[in-house]
Each structure stands twice: as C-alpha cells, then as structure tokens.
Image (cartoon, rainbow, N blue to C red):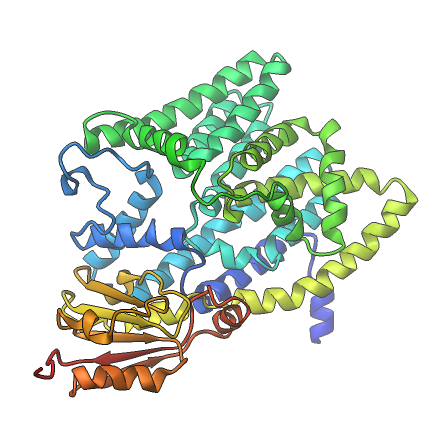
Amino acid sequence: MQLSEKMKAIDWSSLKTILFVGLIVRLIAAIFSEGYAMHDDHFLVIEAAGSWADGFDYNHWLPWNKPAGAAPEGHSFTYVGLNYLFFASLKAIGISDPKTLMLINRLVHALFSLLVIRFGYLITEKLSNKKTAVYVGWVLALLWALPFLSVRNLVEVVSIPFLMWAVWLSLQENRKWALFYSGLLIGVAISFRYQIAIYAVGLGIYYLFKLEWRKLILMTAGSLCMFLLTQGLVDYFIWGYPFAEFKGYVVYNMNEGTRYMMNQNYFMYFYVLFGFLLFPLGILALIAYFKSAGKYLLLFVPTFAFLLFHTIFPNRQERFILTIFPLVLILVFLGIEQLRKRRFWDKFWKVSWISFWILNTPLLCVVTIMSSKQSRVNTMYALHGKAKGDEHILIEATGETNPEMMPYFYSGKWNYTFLERWSTDTINPASFYTIQPQDYIFFFGEKSLEQRIDTFKVIYPKMHLEAQIQPSFVDKFLNSVNPRNSNSYVEIWKTEATKKAE
C-alpha cells in the first residue's frame, strides 16, 4: 500500500489518532527542547527540588534553614515536593546526570499533558458534537506553543490536566459522586497554583445562581478535603501549623503583590489567549468566546472570573493566564459553531482556519525543537563532574546588558559563590572583583571580549580557556531583538586561583 493510500486509510477524526500525533510532537519537544522557558519554571521548581534531593535547600524555603522567627514565603510545596521525590527516586537507582534527569522529567510531563487533549476533545463532544471536538483536539495537539510549554515545569501549565479532568467529571450528571471527585481534582490544581481558587469560586457562583445546592456542596467539599490534605497537613508537618505557605502567599500578595512587576496593559491577557491562535483566527476567537457565554455558562463564568481577576490585579505576567487557555479554546469553538450559522462568519471561519494552519505549522516546527536559555544551562553543565561545588565564580558581564541567575542544578553542586560584574559598573576596576580569588570567570557576550579577557590575564597569568558555550538559534535571535534577553555566547576560563603579586 502506497503512502498516500495509507494516509487516506487513517481516521483523522479519531481521538486515538489525535492523541498519537500529539504524543509524537511532545516527545520531540521533550528530547530536543532543553532548558527552561522562564525564571519560575526552573528556579522556583527544579532548583528547589534538585537541591532537596542532594541534601541542600537552594531557596532557603524550609523553616530549619531560616533565621528564627522567619515566616513562610508563600510557595506551595505540592509540585516542588513531587519533583523532589522524582529526583530522589532516580538518584537512588543511580541516575544522577542533570541532563538525563531533566530529559526523563520532560518525558513524564509530555505524557501527562496528553490528558489536556483527551479531556478537551471529550468535553467539547459532550457539549456539542464530534466535528467540533475534532477541531479542538487538533488545535490542542498541534498549536505552535503547546508542545513546548507542555514539557516545561510551569505550575500554570502542569495544573491544567487536573482542571480539565475536573471539568469533565462535572459534566457527568449520571455519576452520583462525580462532583465530589471533580472537587478533589480542583483541590489538587489549587495546591499546584493557588490562583486556580478563582476558577473554583467562579464555578461556585454558577452553581449558586442556578440553585444547584447539591453540586455546590459536593464540589466545595471535594476541593476543601484535598486542600486540607495538601496544604494543611503537609504544612503542619513542615511548619508546625496548617496552611503556613498559603497564609504567607496571601500576606505577600497583599503587601507586595500590587507593587511587584506592575503592568498597566489591561488587555495583555486577551492578547495572550487569542493571540495564540494567530491572525485572523484570533479575532474570530475573541468574538466567539463571548458568543458562547449565553449557552455555556458552566465554562464561561469560571473562565471569565479567572480572566477578570488577573486583568484587575496589578501584577500581570503572560504565564498567569495559561491555565485556562484550553477551556477558553473549547468555548471559542463552541462559539464559532454558533457564529457559522450566518454566511459572513462561515466564510470568515473558513479563511481563518486555513490561515491558521499556514502560520501555525512553521512556528510549530521551530518552537517544538527550541532549546531555551541554552547558554546558561550548558555553562553550568560544563562544570558537572569537574567542579567541587564550593568554587568562587565571577560573572563578567560588561559585554551584556545584565547577567542572569545561573542554574546550579545542571552542575550537580550547590555551594558556589557567585560575584557579578555588570556593564553598568564603570567605576570599579577588575581588581575590585578579585580581592577574593576567583576559581572561574564566565565571560558573557562577545563585545570587547578579547580586551576583557586580557584585563583578567594580568591578574591571573595562568588563566586558560575551559569551554566555549554557544546560545541556541532562538536565544541568539531574542538577544538581538532585545539585549535584555541575556542568552548570549559564554566563555568559561579557569584562573588556577593564583593572583599576580602586587
């Protein structure tokens, strides 16, 4: 049978086919897309969990590593704790290479993310029909950014399968305890990402106005039970009292959250949610989302509550809204189904759908295999198996806009002492940064590189090149567009820690 005949024989509307294709793309992302996307998916998850597995506490989150009387900082231990158990288990059977650990980590996340596709398809089919479910399934499987995000450690993304599963159970009217189980899953999602409580509140408001008291009570009971276990019991054993981290989170956001990373763009989350679908489908999607409100309030009310809260709250970051994207996508296609009853919108839809795949396909190919923060990751990985872990390291970043935090995890050690020399320092000479002898110097950026190296060779005559680290193509591109993306070329020089006599 020829390839074309085999392709025709495939049932492209089958959920199994969609899941299989989605799996292949996510496995490719897991294998080739190394690094991390943003600060939080590495430094607030992997660095903490990885250090705990090695007997350290990188972020000093645990009470026995804090000064007496210090308060919790507001970080849920649920997802970080699961990663700690994951790393500790692998290390117990002899797997300790940082890149191997993260490859397995990404593979696990790739498999877990398939639940988003599955439940997205099933929810849509339940609320509408198979044809609309197929549209949703294929977009969730192959949207340009989703495979990349699916293998990252962002709590905003990792919590989505639990939320989708909860929504699916909430639609099972014939199952007596479905709403309780749905509440349990929402409770898990909240323990991953506290803000998902806003979605739960929105769902509760829907049941309240519909006077569906039994559903409200079951869902609330399930959520509270799981939250009590994951936040009350766990925090009690760690801190000596329940809900310690949750309380710390609320206090922090009341005092600091309104001032941290202020963003005056009130439409940012609309750009993210509907910009993902590119032009012109994104415009149609915005209209369709609000069109769906009248018929599908069960999904619309909690997603809109989530969107409204994050739009009003001053601290706005793009990743915050990712949690509800699959549910918004379902509403978009349900709304499009209603809009297509009119001839104009039907034509607009057909053009938009074709345009979407023309634009989405090349983006998917690039982003799926994109390594992010490659130079920082590989710089630290170059020390793996070589460094003792207590070295003094100078980041010489006068050829950069500013240096960034280095991911200790990839070196496998945790006791380094880093010193940074910024491009803004035009006063202090090189000798100021070498009063304490440095074991390594990381030269960031190629600007005036030879001159910068020669300056330190005067101080460290035996200094020699250890490694040259290239950024990924995408990192290099982002750096050229905005120099604040400090993902440039790095040279590692070992000083031999012998200063020239003065």
Query: Is residue 11 visible in the rendered structure shown here?
Result: yes
Residue 422 versus residue 497: which sits nearer the camera? 422
Q: Residue furthest right?
A: 343
- What percent of the width, then of the height, locates residue 72? 26, 35
- What percent of the width, then of the height, locates residue 442? 28, 74
Q: Residue at x 10, y 81 (%)?
A: 498
Residue 424 falls in which quadrant of the image?
bottom left
The C terminus: image quadrant: bottom left
Q: Residue at x 33, y 39 (%)?
A: 75
Residue 237 falls in which quadrant of the image?
top left
Q: In the image, is residue 191 above or below residue 438?
A: above
Q: Is residue 54 left or right of residue 277?
A: left
Query: Is residue 295 visible in the rendered structure shown here?
Result: no
Residue 445 versus residue 49: which sits nearer the camera? 445
Residue 142 versus residue 301: which sits nearer the camera? 301
Q: Is residue 16 left or right of residue 470?
A: right
Q: In the image, is residue 350 above or below residue 264?
A: below
The N terminus: image quadrant: bottom right
Q: In the image, is residue 20 above or below residue 298?
A: below
Q: Is residue 435 left or right of residue 188?
A: left
Q: Residue furthest front?
A: 427
- What percent of the width, then of the height, locates residue 374? 40, 70
Residue 337 versus residue 252: which sits nearer the camera? 252
